[in-house]
Image: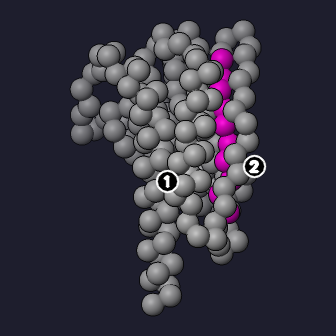
Amino acid sequence: MAAQDGVAGVRRTGLRAACLLLSATAPFAASHAQQPTPPATAKSAPAVTVGGFRSERASLRAHVATCTEARCLTGSKVSYILYPPGSKPDFERFKSLRAGLERSFQQRLPLGSKVSFSPPTMTRDGAATVFEARRTETHMNGQSRTVITRQLYTSRMAVELISSSTDANVAEANLDQFQAPLIAAADGGAPR
């Protein structure tokens, strides 16, 4: 019975996380919804694939990749949402959305669990603007998960990447593995 309760708790936590992810990205997505998007087909491939990950399309613009190998820590995930080119970065809005997400997490936190948030950051180089936020969830059983959200804007693309893993360094490395080919694909040079 205890094992079933644990599984149910994990499912509830996963469902909460999915709902929070959607609520956090919905305003960002809504601001870009006016852009026309080609119809999805049953055979639509992900924008990029990375070795060691099983990829699937979650929606028209959203993709989820689950690690299937030890090198990327089996079960770790990277999701990305593609937005139309020309999307404008708004760091104040990003910080505001993160603050709302933090409040929502704190209100829905399972008993005995805790979550910590790092302040959102913004970096710019000649070609890109990047917003990033991190949180670490620690559950009653002592297990923790790091979630990194990164919004990347270039002149040719806008993408939101979300990486989660029980190892913070792996979450970062997995995110980077997807970011580089997504940028290359936007520039027209990366194979799927």
Magenta stretch secondary structure, dominant:
strand
Q: Quick check: can you spot residue 100? A: yes
Labelled pair 1, 2 in contact (Cβ < 8 Å): no
Farthest residue in the bottom direction?
A: 1
Q: Quick check: can you spot residue 187? A: no
Query: In this image, 45 relative to 173: left or right?
Result: left
Q: Amino acid at mark 2?
A: Asn
> Number of numbered discs present?
2
Query: Mark 1 or 2, which is nearer the eye?
Result: 1
- The relative height of residue 19 versus residue 33 in the rendered view (above or below) is below
Disc number at residue 17? 1
- The relative height of residue 101 versus residue 32 in the rendered view (above or below) is below
Residue 136 locus on image (x, y percent): 68, 53
Q: Which residues are magenta?
A: 129-138
| Crowding near the residue tagged with mark 1, few <14, some 14–19, many ≥20 C-alpha atoms within 10 Å | few
Which residue matches tag 2? 169
- The relative height of residue 154 versus residue 181 in the rendered view (above or below) is above
Query: In this image, 93 relative to 133: left or right?
Result: left
Task: Confirm whether the magenta stretch covers residue 5.
Answer: no
Here the colouring is: one colour
| Crowding near the residue tagged with mark 2, few <14, some 14–19, many ≥20 C-alpha atoms within 10 Å | few
The residue sitting at 62% across, 33% down in the picture is 150
**Secondary structure of residue under mark 1:** helix
Give the Cα separation between the discs numbered 1 and 2: 21 Å
The residue sitting at 42% across, 49% down in the picture is 19
The residue sitting at 50% across, 42% down in the picture is 79
